[in-house]
Amino acid sequence: MFVELGHFTLILAFAIACVQAFVPVVGAARGWRGWMAMAEPAATLQLFCIAWSFTALIYAFVTSDFSLRIVTENSHTLKPMLYKVTGVWGNHEGSMLLWCLILALYGAFVAWFGGGLPPRLRARVLAVQGAVGAASLAFLIFTSNPFLRLATPPFNGHDLNPLLQDPGLAFHPPFLYLGYVGLSVSFSFAIAALIEGRVDAAWGRWVRPWTLTAWIFLTIGIALGSWWAYYELGWGGFWFWDPVENASFMPWLLSAALLHSAIVVEKREALKAWTILLAILAFGFSLIGAFIVRSGVITSVHAFANDPERGVYLLAMTAVFMGGALTLFAARAEALQAKGMFQPVSREGGLIANNVFLAVACFVVFIGTIWPLVTELADGRKVSVGAPFFEAAFTPIMTALAVLLPIGAVLPWKRARLDRAMRVLMPALILALALGALVFAVETEKSALAPVGAVLGAWIVFGAAADLWSRGGRGPIAARARRLARLPRADWGKSLGHTGFGVTIFGIAALTAWTVEDIRVARIGESWDVAGYRVTLVDVGQTEGPNYYSTIAEVDVSDHGRPSLRLLPEKRIYPVAGMPTTEAAIDNGLTRDLYVVIGDPQEGGGWAVRTFIKPYASWIWAGAAIMAMGGLLSLSDRRFRVAAGARKAQRAGVPAE
Amino acid sequence: MRRLLLALALAAAPAFAVQPDEVLDDPALEARARELSQNLRCPVCRNESIDESHAEIARDIRLLLRERLVAGDSDAEAVQYLVDRYGEYVLLKPNAEGANLILWLAAPALLLAGGGMAALYLMRRRARPEAPDALSDDEKARLADLMRE
């Protein structure tokens, strides 16, 4: 009954979304206040309906209601409670419901907290949200309904894919969707602005917090996924350039570009058309991502279901929204007039360079991702485009971005002088180069990668520090510190965000250049050396978990004679799903991770053991966390300004029409 | 029974890609083999290199590759040997020839085009003090170019 009610509210939500997509637009066009005011209760009601459906689905999973098809296919009575709940979005239908829920959540937030927006703009934004919601809900209900029943429910389910029974992956999809779907708000604002034919500083101020929110969630989601791959897949890779990873990475790159270009709109009223285009494309890439993941057109390690009907629907949805948005853009872009004038060497110039690099990086990832599809459709040739291509094509662009970033960040608006900027940055540059030389001197295998990574990372981190320091002005330290403390939080957020980027660059370079790997057959009691660490296989035993059997090894690692660490790598078998997983044992350290994997028993006795020393691995995710914190800091500042800006615009703008 | 099940399951599923018995005695040759393996795709897997894959065929290709290296092939010869047998599909980094040139040239071409358009835009923002429609023309050209690519 409860579940049936969830099914019913889902269909109700679809009907509400249709109304929300239609009525407020007409109201805004005709100036009928009542019709415009419809948007807000519709958005709220839509959220409550979908939330009810989602609760019903969680209830079905928690109570193991195997009369629901997706519960049978993705759950089992023995599965731990945490994964019963997270299993709701560990499949195509449930994850799509989560997508709709988050979409409705964003819509409701715009309705609740958009009180300062001009009523017409708000009605239009909510209507576009409603249209996206209606399309998503139709897709969910008609092609992938999570509430379908089985005529004869089985006694037990097929269990969730064991790779997904992991805390890292359990929370990876919600964050990712909060990011993807968050970009729908920027999209809605862009469309609403195009319909009105007006983009001004206030628009930039409204759209930025939403973009920033989406970008923060995307950053966290991508980092969680990459961290999961690192510890779960058993060989310590953290990024595979898999189509599905690329699908999340493209919106991240474009939303990062959008964040920066919206600043130019806000502060200087320039780059308007480009910013609108970015807002449209960023969400477009979210939709393309959904298509890549869910259609099965491009083979990938994490593809969900290969269903042509779903693929066609998603492609049509992408085509309608992108086609419509771009047509509107082509018709209205002319009306967006730039006001601010500036010299090429200026903050504006730096931000434009940032946008060029990020957008080109995104399109390179895009071309690499779809290239196998293109060649197969064009002449039936099967080619692969994998990590080696992306590393070769993507790295130079990011390197160029990293070189220019600190310079662009210190340039003042309108007109800047490079020599003055370099004077601020000189200590950072000298420190970074010295660090690079030091790294090159001490590294045993002379590769360019690590020193270059160290120079770039340090250049960005120290550059961000130098930028902040210079903002403190002149005079005694105490006065400077006081001025620094009074800087807007957005400035601190910017420096922190850039710092995180530098930290991640260094982590990736160091890990890639310096990983030491050892593969061997070891007997119980045997010891061996890996890069100065003494590793001993103490014992191998068997244990049992709630829904798996496990081979668990005890491995001692001692660091240059210091007392040893005990690591417990596992190899699990999930009998219901018939799948093994490797649970690497990792000792996270500031300068290195010790990473031990236990393999199969060998014919002549002994066990296969793989040991890695992974230098600075944690820096990759620490950097991502710092980026996200920078974003949060900036967001906490925005809130005040958004409110202030909204009030001002309302006073000045509304009566004109 | 449970033990048996466990043993069966373990036997069916090797825990990692490169097995200790595959490793060549000569560390220099082995390093070359590992490096080449990372650029070769496992034909039955989804976007995994033979170095990462657990599949049987990936192991076969790894062994074949090592055989060729031990027999004295250069890197290019060994890879060509595998491409002749398994097709262009096994290359994770497509050769820059024929239609694939588009793929390889996309990044530099886009960067040049984007940089050029940005430069043009910057010049205009500086040169024309009162030209209300200068921006939109420019932006439209940029959009058209981006769309075409």
Image: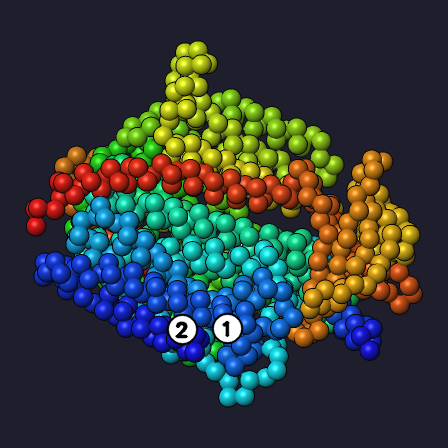
Farthest-out residue, left: A656
Q: Where the N terminus of chain B falls, by quadrant? A: bottom right
Q: Judge by depth and name the residue closer to the eye, A180 or A152.
A: A152
Q: CA distance from mark 2 to mark 1?
A: 10 Å
Residue A414: x %, y % from top left = 28, 30
| Residues at circles 2 and 1 in contact by the CB criterion of under 8 Å | yes
Q: Judge by depth and name the residue closer to the eye, A279 or A556.
A: A556
Give the labeled residue for mark 2: A6
Farthest-out residue, top: A476
When the figure is inspected, residue A34 is found, relative to residue A260, above or below; the finding is: below
Q: Is residue A408 left or right of residue B86?
A: left
In the rendered structure, which amino acid carries the disc numbered 2? Gly
Q: Secondary structure at mark 1?
A: helix
Which chain hosts label 1?
A
When the figure is inspected, residue B143 is found, relative to residue A243, above or below; the finding is: above
Q: Secondary structure at mark 2?
A: helix
Q: Which mark, residue A487?
A: none
Q: Where the C terminus of chain B falls, by quadrant? A: bottom left
Which chain hosts label 2?
A
Residue A54: x %, y % from top left = 43, 67
Same-subunit check for callouts 2 and 1:
yes
Q: Is residue A12 left or right of residue B52?
A: left
- Residue at image location 77% in from the left, 53% down from the top: A568
Rendered image coloring scheme: rainbow
Farthest-out residue, bottom: A151
Mark before the other along the chain sequence, 2 or 1: 2
Give the labeled residue for mark 1: A60
